[in-house]
Image: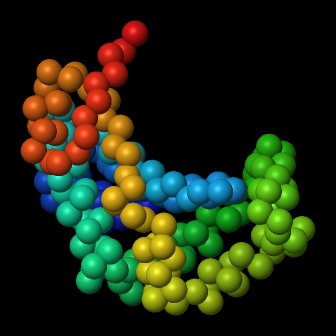
Amino acid sequence: NFLSRINTEIRERRGWSYGLSGNVSLRENQVPYIINAPVQADRTGDSIRVLIEQINAFNSTNGVSDGEHTRTINGNIRQLPGSFETAGAVLGALRSNQLYHRPDNYWESVATRYRGMSAAQMDAAARAVVDPSKFVWVVVGDASVVRPQLTGLGLDIEVVPAS
């Protein structure tokens, strides 16, 4: 969400972006964690370094705070009505119920389940799926500007030219 740690650090504190976001996308056999981080070209390497630091801190001693827990639960509940505004959205919800073998009334109890989740449970769930050692970093930009910034980060670098 907009108040996320990564957004606060890179946008608010450092001024390298207009906004970042991260989210978990549910899939049948995998749970990718996707970070969208449009940053200044000259701060690409610095931004990735900060992201790695933030994720490692989260996975060590700086997990989900009480404030983050409350904000996330309230935000997720408030967005539920808007998730069903179109026929396509309703169909998508039905399809996800089928895909994940959920009961037809799954969405009726989501808010209650969210409210029942503790900060510790949220923290454990996030830690279970956010493994920075499995991250694939996709960086889009001018290779002559961006690549030199990436060499000191210990990441494998493969340049794919735009065609």
Can residue 15 be seen in this snapshot? no
| Residue 154: % across, % down | 17, 48
Residue 139 location (% of width, % of height): 31, 35
Q: In the displayed structure, would residue 14 be above or below residue 62? A: above
In the current view of this chain or complex, which residue is farthest to the right? 104
Q: Is residue 72 left or right of residue 45?
A: right
Judging depth in this view, the residue of 59 and 39 nearest the camera is: 59
Q: Is residue 97 left or right of residue 49?
A: right
Q: Residue at x 59, y 57 (%)?
A: 30
Query: 43 or 61, which is in the foreground?
Result: 61
State how many labels appear: 0
Residue 152 position (above or below residue 42): below
5 shown above or below 94: below
Instruction: Residue at 25% x, 40% y: name it.
Output: 156
**Residue 17 % position (x, y):** 24, 44
Q: Residue at x 39, y 64 (%)?
A: 131
**Could you tell me which residue is drawn at 47 percent across and 81 percent down?**
124
